[in-house]
Structures are given as structure tokens and as C-alpha cells.
Amino acid sequence: MKIAVTAANGKLGSSIVEELKKEIGSENVIGIVRTPEKATHLGVEVRKGDYKSRDEYNEALKGVDKVLLISGMDDPQKRIQQHRNVIEAAKQNGVTKIVYTSIVGDEENNAFSPVVQSNRQTEKDVQNSGLDWAIGRNGIYIEPDLEYIGNYKIDGEIRNSAGEGRCTYTSRKELGFAYAKMLLNDELNGQTYNLVGEPITQQELADLINKIYKTDLKFTPVPYDDYKKERIEELGDFIGNIIAGIYKGISDGANDVPSDFEKVTGRAHKSTIELIKEYKQQS
């Protein structure tokens, strides 16, 4: 059985490839990437595939039994057709199953919603593909907060507009483990799963970081409009708006969802403090 992972040299793709190698051996895993020379570190067969090119995916998916489709990074409206290129190429090549990495989030009420909507459209396209399928909705990654710790230390605070909203953080490593199971266990077919950890507030996140990193951070809640202005000034319109939208979603409760992680993997999702410890040990 050959399993292909798209966008395999990204951080999530690499994590899924590593888990699959453990489960079925590197000879049965194929990484599909835009620039193959950047993916030699994966230790698996690498094929060229750009989401914008149906023809490249027709070639890349030859002889593949199952494919893991990682959500693209392009403009939300462009992603829908790009993902369809992969789905159509999978059908043409006789792929039997497609697993899609979607996201948790609010479809209507914030600047992140267009990204969520485009993911929901691809979910529908996967469900209507005629192939066996399974969909994961990823929680927010813990890693960006931990990569940002140097800045938090300088500022002495975690500052955003999430208020008392609770967020179910996950990690790319946990997601890699879950997606390998979803690809290999056909009893999970035909369902959509929230791949998330425990719900915590930003204050609790600050407390946990303080415990592991021996920092003294506090959480400073900021009104949404002020936070959006700050993010846009620092990151530009597109990314600034999206980041502000994510924290608006947390504030509104969009990221406080029940977890299906144990149903998918057979074990509980690691606690947030375990995710932080694991990250610190590896960095």
C-alpha cells in the first residue's frame, strides 16, 4: 500500500510523514512537494506536485492507494480549486481514500472566517468525491506561541483580544500521530473529527509557560479593535487581519470544541503542559 502526503516538507506534512514511516515503512510513503530538492530530508520517495497544476498531480498520484491532502496556504478562494485539482487527480488515478486536514473555527463572524469557509468547501468536495474519506479539523498549534517566547519575555506579557475565551491547543506532532491513524484505520472513514487538546484560557497558557520556562509573563487582554490595529501595523493587512480574527474566534468560543482525538488515536491528547515541555526539550 502506497500513501502519499501533499505539502510533505511543511511542518505538519513532515510530522505526518514521520509517523507513517514508523507505521508502514519509508518505502510505502510518498511525499509530494512543489520543490523536490527541498524535501530530500524526508527519507521517502519524493514527487513534484503544485496544487495549481492538475497535470502535476495526475503524475504525482500514479500508483497511490491513499492520499493525505494538507490544506493549502494560498488566498482562501484560490485554495478551493487548488484542492479540487488534487481530488480530481486522485479519482483519475484510482486512489481509494482521501484524508483532509481542515480547521476548527467560526465560519461567519471574523476576519479568519473566509479561511474557515474555504476549508468547509473542500470538506464538502472531499465528501462528494466518491472516494473513501476522513476529515480532521485541526485546533490551533501551540508552536507559534512557543516560538514567540523571546518576544513575550521582552514584553513581559501575552497580549491579545481573546479575553476569557478558551482555546483547545494542539501540536503538529500530535496531529501527525492522529493523521497517520486516520489514513491507516478504515473504521474511521466517513467522519469529521476535531483534532484538539484541552480547552484553556490565555491566562492559563501564560501560567503554564511560566511554569516550564521559569518566566513571569502575565496575560493582558486588549479590546479587539485595538489589537487588530496593532497586528495590521506589525504584520500588514492580510496577516494582521487573520491573526486578529483568530483571537476574535477564541474570544467568541469558536475554539472551545469537544475533542475527538482519543476516538481517532486510542489515547488521550497530551495536556498543554506536556506539549510545552515536549517543545522545550526539542528546541
Image (cartoon, grey):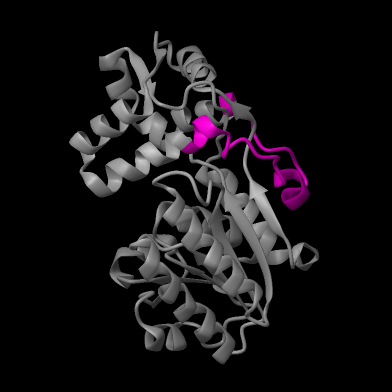
Position of the N terminus, as image quadrant, is bottom right
Q: Look at the image and tell me in which quarter the C terminus lies.
A: top left
Query: Can you tell which quarter of the image residue 68 is in?
Result: bottom right
In the rendered image, the vertical position of residue 130 relative to residue 155, given as above or below? below
Q: Is residue 137 left or right of residue 224?
A: right
For the magenta stretch, what is the residue range? 249-273
- Asked whether residue 270 is drawn in magenta, I would say yes
Q: In the picture shown, does residue 250 fall above or below 155? A: below
- Residue drawn at point x = 48 percent, y = 78 percent: 84
Q: 212 above or below 279? A: above
How far across and how far down the image is residue 265, in percent? 73, 49
Q: Is residue 181 magenta?
A: no
Residue 249 in percent (x, y) is at 49, 38
Q: Give the image location of residue 97, x and y in percent.
A: 66, 76
- 96 relative to 62 in the view: left or right: right
Residue at screen point 64% across, 61% down: 135
The spot of residue 280 in percent (x, y) is 45, 27
Residue visible at 30% across and 34% down?
228
Residue at figure coordinates x 36%, y 45% from the top left: 242
